[in-house]
Amino acid sequence: MATGTKDFYKTLGVSEKSNQAEIKSAYRTLAKKYHPDANPGNAKAAGRFKGIGEAYAVLSDPEKRKHYDQISRIPTRGFGRGGGAPRGSAAPSSGGFSFEDLEGFGGLGDIFSSIFDRRPKAAAPETNSGPAKGRSIEYSVEISFLTAVKGDKISIDVPITEGCATCGGSGASPGMGSKKCGECKGTGAISFGQGGFALNRPCPACFGRGEIPESPCNACSGSGTVRQNRRFKITVP
C-alpha cells in the first residue's frame, strides 16, 4: 500500500481477493454496527461509519476498484539512482519505480511534464465539466439468412453506464450532500516523490473529483453511475 493511501480493504475487513458479494456483506454488517442512529452522540462511531461508506463507494464499483488497486501499488520511492530519501527519513527499500503502475493515469508525457515543469499550475478543470467521449463497442448478433440478404431493422440490448437517477450522479444518498475529500484536501490529486522529484496522482479516495459523498447512495453504491441495458434499433446491413 502506497504511503498516504487509505487501506479500504482493511477498513471493511476484507481481502484484496474478496468478491463483490463479500464486500457488500462486510459493508452492511459494519454500516449497521456503526450507523449514527445506533450510536447517538458517538463521534468515533460516526467517523468510522463515514470511513466505511467511503471504502464501500470505491470497492463496490469495479472500475473505481481497479484504479484504486493500481494507485495503491504505486511506490513512493525515488527513481532509481540519485533518488535518495529526503533528509530525516529512512532510506527507501530496494527496487525501482515502474511506469507500468501508472497505466491509465496520463502516460509518460504527463509524468515528465509534472517532474520538469515547475511553473505554478492553474487549478485543474473539473472532470465532470462535460460528457466524455464514448468508446466504440462491437456486438455479435445472430440474424437470419433472409435478413442478411434483404436487410432489416433489428433490436439489440446493450449494457451501458449512465448517471444514477436516484442521486443525480452525485453519489450521495438523497438529502445528503458531498464534502471536501480529506485525503486530497479537495484538490483531486495527491503529490508524492523523493530526491527532488514530485509527481501528482489521482486521489484514490475521490478519484480526482475533490469531494466524496457524506453517505453513499444505495442505488449506485456511491459511484454516481449505474449499469443497465439499453435497447437500440440498428439497420442491417
Image (spheres, helix red, strand yellow):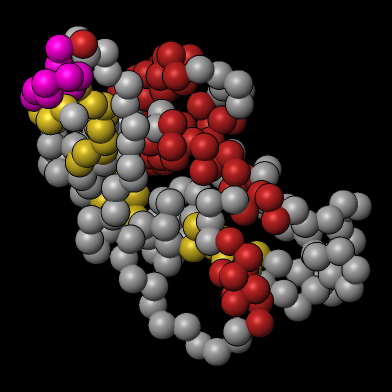
Which segment is the magenta one?
A: 146-156
**Is residue 151 shown left or right of residue 198?**
left
Q: In which quarter of the image is the C terminus?
A: top left
> From the image, which quarter does the N terminus lie in?
top right
Q: Residue at x 26, y 41 (%)?
A: 224
Relative image position of residue 98 (x, y in whole percent): 75, 53
Depth check, front residue: 12 or 189: 189
Please state if 223 lies on the left or on the right of 157 as rendered: right
Q: Residue 122 sits in which quadrant?
A: bottom left
Q: Camera-side residue: 205 or 236?
A: 236
Report if residue 103 is visible in the image. yes
Q: Residue at x 49, y 36 (%)?
A: 65
Image height of 39 relative to 100, above or below: above
How far from the left and from the top, in percent, is residue 226? 25, 32
At 43% across and 37% down in the image, what residue appears?
Answer: 63
Tell me: residue 187, above or below residue 141. below
Determine if the magenta segment contains residue 14: no
Pick out the residue farthest to the bottom: 119
Residue 45: x, y in percent? 41, 33
**Residue 84 can be seen, yes or no:** no
Q: Is residue 90 left or right of residue 100?
A: right
Foreground residue among 17 and 181: 17
- Res 157 quadrant in image: top left
Foreground residue among 212 and 124: 124
